[in-house]
Image (spheres, rainbow, N blue to C red):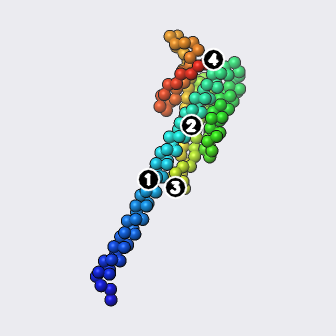
Amino acid sequence: MPTIGSIWQTNARWRRFFAALAGALVLLIGLDVFDRVHARSQLQQLADIAALAGVQALQHSAGQNETQRREAAVAASRAVTDGFGSASATFTASIAPIYVSVELSQSSGWLRRINGRLDVVGKAGYLPPSQANDARQVRLYNRLEWNIVSARSD
């Protein structure tokens, strides 16, 4: 017949086992959350850069027809996103007003099946130069964070 001491030791072993299992699970979830936050940040930055590249391409193709300008913008945005790997991308370009939208989607995190897809949108537009500024300066903006970037429009 088991004594109280042996039952207590068995229960203590089970408690240590479940505590270790719970600690490992918390660590795994924490690493997964960190990985998702990092992946979202990188994906958002890529979408923003691709959108800005598309707007610059729209500005540089000012003498062409609308279809050619849209194709140039999409090609410039696609050139930025092509080397990123498994992210699927959707590009939208508009002539009036001038803006480019880049939507990127990718699975991320160590628990990919549970987390699902990670979706971000980068939008950039063109603000015509004001009279007070240098005539060759264009202003590009990101609609999500309203970051203003100046670029040469030569």
User: Splitting the image into 4 quarters, where does residue 83 fall?
Assistant: top right
Foreground pick, 154 / 60: 154
Q: Earlier in the sequence, mark 1 or mark 2?
A: 1
Gap in Å between the C-alphas at discs 4 and 1? 48 Å
Residue at image coords 69%, 30%? 71
Q: Is residue 61 left or right of residue 15?
A: right
Rendered view: 135 above or below 31: above
Q: CA distance from mark 3 to mark 1?
A: 11 Å
User: The disc labelled 3 sits on which kind of residue?
Assistant: Leu
- Is disc 3 surrounded by few (<14), some (14 to 19) or many (20+) residues within 10 Å? some
Mark earlier in primary sequence (4, 2): 2
Query: CA–CA distance between discs 1 and 2?
Result: 24 Å
Q: Where in the figure is residue 70, as x and y percent of width and height?
A: 67, 28
- Residue 111 has which mark? 3
Of the image marks 3 and 1, the number of the one nearer the N terminus: 1
Around disc 4, counting alpha carbons within 10 Å, would you say few (fewer than 14), some (14 to 19), or many (20 or more)? few
Residue 154: which numbered mark, if any?
A: 4
Looking at the image, is mark 4 or mark 1 earlier in the sequence?
1
For mark 1, what is the residue? 30
Neighbour tally class for label 2: few under 14, some 14-19, many 20 plus, Cα within 10 Å = many
Looking at the figure, which quarter contains the N terminus? Answer: bottom left
The amino acid type, in three-letter code, at marker 1 is: Gly
Residue 3 visible in this rendered orientation of the protein: yes
